[in-house]
Image: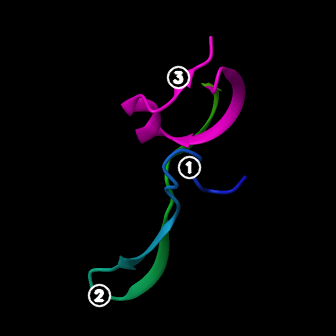
C-alpha cells in the first residue's frame, strides 16, 4: 500500500528527531491513512484516504 492519499495527495514528509543535546537523526511523518469504502462517480470502490479528507467530507462513505 502506497502512503499517498487518493483525494488530496498527502504523502510522508521528512523531518528530524532532535535530542536535548541537539543530536539530529532523520525521521518520517506519515499521514494517517485509512482504507474506506467510498462512493465515487456513483460507484462504490475501496480507497486509501487520510482522516482529514474523511472528516472534511471530501468523500461519501458507502452504506
Residue depicted at 70% across the width and 23% down the height: 44
Q: Give the percent coordinates (x, y) of residue 15.
A: 41, 75
Which of the two discs, 3 and 2, labels the residue nearer the N terminus?
Answer: 2
Residue depicted at 70% across the width and 22% down the height: 43
Residue located beneath label 3 in the image: 60
Q: Give the percent coordinates (x, y) of residue 37.
A: 66, 26
Farthest residue to the top: give it: 63
Horizontally, residue 37 falls left or right of residue 60, namely right
Residue depicted at 48% across the width and 81% down the height: 26
Q: Residues within 10 Å of mark 3 (few under 14, many from 20)?
A: few
Q: Secondary structure at mark 3?
A: strand
Q: Nearer the viewer, residue 39 or 16?
A: 39
Q: Residues within 10 Å of mark 2 (few under 14, many from 20)?
A: few
Q: Give the percent coordinates (x, y) of residue 61.
A: 56, 21
Residue located beneath label 2 in the image: 22
Q: Give the percent coordinates (x, y) of residue 14.
A: 46, 74
- C-alpha span from label 1 to label 3: 15 Å
Above or below, 61 relative to 11:
above
Horizontally, residue 28 falls left or right of residue 45, namely left
Q: Secondary structure at mark 1?
A: loop
Q: Answer yes or no: do the residues labelled 3 and 2 have beta carbons within 8 Å?
A: no
Q: Quadrant of the C terminus?
A: top right
Which one is closest to the eye, mark 3 or mark 2? Answer: 3
Does the segment drawn in magenta span residue 44? yes
What is the span of residues highlighted in magenta in the rendered image?
40-63
Residue located beneath label 1 in the image: 5
Residue depicted at 63% across the width and 27% down the height: 41
Which of the two discs, 2 and 1, labels the residue nearer the N terminus?
Answer: 1
Amino acid at each position: 500500500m502506497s502512503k499517498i492519499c487518493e483525494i488530496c495527495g498527502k504523502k510522508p514528509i521528512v523531518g528530524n528527531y532532535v535530542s536535548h543535546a541537539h543530536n539530529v537523526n532523520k525521521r518520517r511523518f506519515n499521514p494517517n491513512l485509512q482504507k474506506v469504502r467510498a462512493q465515487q462517480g456513483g460507484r462504490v470502490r475501496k480507497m486509501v484516504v487520510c482522516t482529514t479528507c474523511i472528516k472534511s467530507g471530501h468523500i461519501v462513505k458507502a452504506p
